[in-house]
Image (cartoon, grey):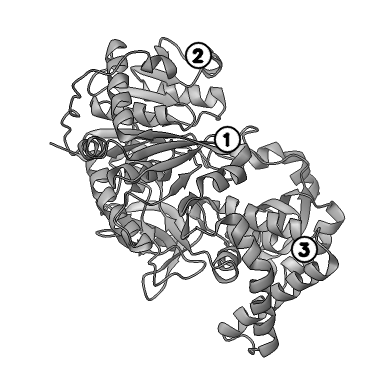
Amino acid sequence: MNHFVHKILSNLEAWPDRIFAAEVHGTRLVSTEGRRLRALVEIARHGLRERGVSAGDRVVLVAPNSTRWIATDLAILAEGATVVPLYARQDPKELAGMIRDADPKLVITADHALEGAIRPHVDAVPFALLPDLFAGTAPKEHEPARALASDHVVTIIYTSGSSGEPKGVMTHVANVEHMLPVLDVKLRELSGVPGGSDRVFHYLPFCFAGSRMVLWGCLFRANGIMMSTSLENLAEEIKTARPEYFLNVPALLERIKSGVEKKLAERPYPVRVAYAEAIEAWRRLSLAKAGRGETRKRDELLVAAAKRVIFRSIRAQIGEQLKGLVCGSAPLPEEVQRWFVELLEIPVFQVYGLTETTAIVTIDRKDAVVPGRVGHAIRDVEMKLGDDGELLVRGPNIFPGYFRREEASRASFTDDGWFRTGDQCTIDERGNLAIIGRVKNLLVPTSGHNVAPEPLEERVLQTVPGVEQAVVIGHARPYLAVIVTGDVDERTMEAALEKVNEGLPHYRRLRKAFVAKEKLTPENGLLTANQKLRRSAIERHFAKEIDALYA
């Protein structure tokens, strides 16, 4: 049967002069038109065949985002093989473990250095360098993609491993076939155009499920995509790309907000005071809208003046052409979303999903965005709450299971076929979802109360200046405490806890804090590849310091 890969390859042929992929190198765009990208796909297909890859095989692709990454991905799919994309910056031993689990026909790496780091930990698996795959020339005649059944596994994406050993999530043709038209409709709704001309920028690695849907979604709509090539130079790349839309993780939006506030703190005294007074006025107005205060005309004037004088220039630096930011992978703090929407007047649309749900369960509706909530269920997807408020989902987007893990696959579903997301949620009367935290992350101190750590961590980040990361601990302990990183000292942190604890019941108050000197990163094993906390690893790493908090 024809499938989404046929559609993508047909788009490349139908619009040979349209730019489908563009790498952003500092101030320079390196663009690839449909004609050239289609040729690269055929060259890569030939290279795969030379290395013995055939339909049904699994091929690991571990490399940073690039036009060649896209061409290789499409080539593997067109050959009827399964793509296993891995994060190039992950620890080589962890990558090797996933490779062994995937049992691939071939491993494609970005360069000799990456191959050299992985190969000692993997036995008897052929390797190939990504550049070598394109050593040949494109055949004069392009071959169509191989026909694939609806239950063919197009990709295996390994979960982040935030709460255990990574598992390979299998995604069927049918999952993707359902999702891409849904995405097309949603993007038309958000942008107001049918595709082909949206300026979409992407900086997250394509190996993640959400990134994969952004990539395939753009190509399915015959729309180009611009790619970051250096996360160290993201601000300059965004200025070069001048995007109308791009997918974000909450950490970037929080970083933008804190970066703006840090620069304002270095401005002359009148500017600092004007910003501080405007923020306080804005917060009072927000409370008044929620029925928890009175509207003051002076507050309205202060915010209006700040928007004209301060926030207009901030918006210009971030990008006046921005039509919207899409945010997913973790809950976005409500105040951060409102800061962008109400003060910078940049729409922020939230999306929620997991690798197991083909990346998406809910997306914000353009006319029904509620800060702090992550939108409504997409077409043909059902949601309900189970025990402990766990979100249960079913629909054509749900994965068939984990690769070679039948017991784990069965455990991820209820007896009547609902997928267990593991997320603790609420659903309002309009069907708008809010994420409270992970069910498995619930802390139960010796008081016996169930406490979700995520809202408290958000509260610390929003309340204490200088804090960049926060991890609340206290399971089976007499009280809760917090580990933080950032530009803050122990004395300041301890003093700030009084403000953090305002209005909280006794069992949710943070009694002590530890300021870690090292930042939590994927490189030191304390964050997953997509920036989620590895809580058990963090507690093991800081075991002595945690024991001292409870001594």
Q: Is residue 119 above or below residue 409?
A: above
Q: Residues within 10 Å of mark 3 (few under 14, many from 20)?
A: many
Marks 2 and 1 sit apart, C-alpha to C-alpha, by: 25 Å
What's the amino acid at mark 2? Arg
Front in this rendered view, residue 221 or 487: 221
In the image, residue 217 above or below residue 144: below
Three-letter code, disc 3: Leu
Q: CA distance from mark 2 to mark 3?
A: 48 Å
Please identify, in this view, whether the residue under mark 3 or under mark 1 is nearer the observer.
1
In the rendered image, which residue does mark 2 sit on?
A: 119
Q: Which mark is residue 497?
A: 3
Task: Work out whether residue 402 or residue 547 is closer to the camera in this orientation and state it.
Answer: 402
Image x and y of residue 541, in percent: 69, 37
Relative to residue 349, is residue 272 drawn left or right? right
Q: Circle 2 — which element?
A: helix
Q: Earlier in the sequence, mark 2 or mark 3?
A: 2
Q: Is residue 444 visible?
A: no
**Residue found farthest to the front:** 17
Q: Position of residue 90 (x, y in %)?
A: 55, 30
**Residue type at numbered disc 1:** Ser
Q: Secondary structure at mark 3?
A: helix
Whether residue 87 can be seen here: yes
Q: Nearer the viewer, mark 2 or mark 1?
A: 1
Image quadrant in which you'd find residue 479: bottom right
Q: Earlier in the sequence, mark 2 or mark 1?
A: 2
Check the image and report above or below for 418 versus 278. Answer: above
Tell me the quadrant of the picture where the N terminus can be found: top left
Neighbourhood count class around disc 2 (C-alpha, 10 Å): few under 14, some 14–19, many 20 upward: some
Q: Which residue is mark 1?
A: 230
Which mark, residue 2? Answer: none
- Closer to the observer: label 2 or label 3? 2
